[in-house]
Image (spheres, rainbow, N blue to C red):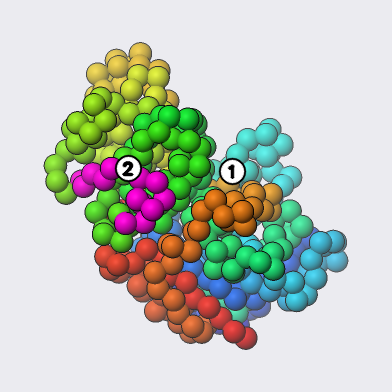
Amino acid sequence: MKGYGVIKVGRPGWLEKEKPVAGPLDAIIRPTVLAPCSSDTHSMHGGAGPKENLILGHEAVGEVVETGSMVRNFKPGDKVVVPCVTPDWTGRYIQEGKYNAHDNGLMGGFKFLLSKDGTFAEFFHVNMADANLVGLPENIAPEAALMTVDMMSTGFHVVELADVSYGETVVVIGIGPVGLMAVAGAQLKGAGRIIVVGTRPNCVKIAKEYGANDVVSYKDGDIVEQVKDLAGGKADKVIIAGGNAATLTQAILMVKPTGIVSNVNYYDAADTFTVPAPTWGLGMANIDIRGGFCPGGAVRIEKLINVIKHKRIDPTKLITHRFDGFEKIEDAFMLMDKKPPDLIKPAVFIKW
Ligand code: NDP
Ligand code: ZN
């Protein structure tokens, strides 16, 4: 079968691979809507370690073509939403009641890209189908469901980590698709004031539609001073969904003592964080610094679909570019890599 991925670090392209095989608990899926993600491009450039001969992609809605002998809830022909994180539910961390994204170690639940081929293929494999797949409801647009599997799950997770509550002043640094979902999530959690950091005009427009009150540009000088001027002091919570290694220090500088800095931004393996002691109240400020990975599994994604179903938010605003046909995966991926200013999220629609 054909798939699109990384031939070797820095070189994307089409690959020829064996069709995957389903174990007793697993399913084989044909994708019908796909989206490339920043993490796919990071992987192509070698960000998460050298990768070669690997099919990329981890955001998909599709159709079941084959199920293992022990799968009870799905059959060939079913339309399904595929979480980007598909844990091994027997995993040690899960048994300890911890985040499911780390089933047997750091990001262990992220099978696509990290331990097997991804979704940019004619067929792809999903482990533990009953626990990891969600039936696509009749009245939900496939592209809306597609936005739950990573963008909404990650954007909402960083809000969960920040423990946002009614009336709080929340800063969201970075308003790409992940940060925009964090803005929507903070609004749903009852944030009082939401201040965002970002510049792309269409992201700024959508951030306001999702609930942002004020916008700060990191191109207009120190964001710490800008946020403090706007808020009349420090913020209750600071969420990081973009930026660079310096952003963590900035976030700590703009959060109140007892506040929380929560992060889902991806850093480079070579990055180092510098936190001058006074920034962290000489260690006495009770500032929590948290970072996390996108939660997965069927129940998580069902709940996010419920948020869309009852019209709390419309995540399809993120989709700025649409492509038709399997071979267009390449154009969509290259666009994600180039990131023109008007791009938020591309989606590829496939008819077989
Ligand atoms: P984008 O690149 O689309 O958005 C990044 C945002 O950060 C933009 O708003 C950008 O502003 C802003 N930004 C850039 N530089 C700075 C700076 N110096 N200071 C402040 N803000 C800055 O990213 P995505 O939304 O796609 O993803 C966000 C991050 O989340 C990525 O690192 C991605 O890899 C990661 N991620 C993590 C996951 C997880 O599970 N933890 C899952 C999925 C993604 P501008 O408007 O100017 O472009
Ligand atoms: Zn992703």
Q: Position of residue 238 (x, y in %)?
A: 36, 34
Q: Is residue 239 visible?
A: yes
Question: Considering only vertical position in the picture, is 336 above or below 130?
Answer: below
Helix, strand or loop for disc 2: loop
Q: Which residue is mark 2?
A: 213
- Name the quarter where the C terminus is drawn: bottom right
Report the Cα–Cα distance between label 1 and label 2. Answer: 35 Å
Q: Is residue 206 magenta?
A: yes
Examine the image and state in which quarter residue 235 appears. Answer: top left
Label 1 environment density (alpha carbons within 10 Å; few <14, some 14–19, many ≥20): many
Examine the image and state in which quarter residue 231 appears. Answer: top left
Q: Position of residue 84 (x, y in %)?
A: 57, 58
Question: Considering only vertical position in the picture, is 90 above or below 70?
Answer: above
Which residues, given as a range, are shown in magenta? 205-218
Between marks 1 and 2 in the image, the one whose residue lies nearer the viewer: 2
- Name the quarter where the N terminus is drawn: bottom right
Q: Position of residue 258 (x, y in %)?
A: 40, 19
Q: Is residue 275 visible?
A: no
Q: Which residue is mark 1?
A: 102
Residue at screen point 23% across, 30% down: 228
Residue at screen point 42% across, 70% down: 346
Label 2 environment density (alpha carbons within 10 Å; few <14, some 14–19, many ≥20): few
Instruction: Mark 1 or mark 2: name the one nearer the start of the chain.
Output: 1
Residue flagged by tag 2: what amino acid is it? Asn
Residue at screen point 59% across, 69% down: 142
Residue flagged by tag 1: what amino acid is it? His
Left or right, residue 159 beside residue 304: left
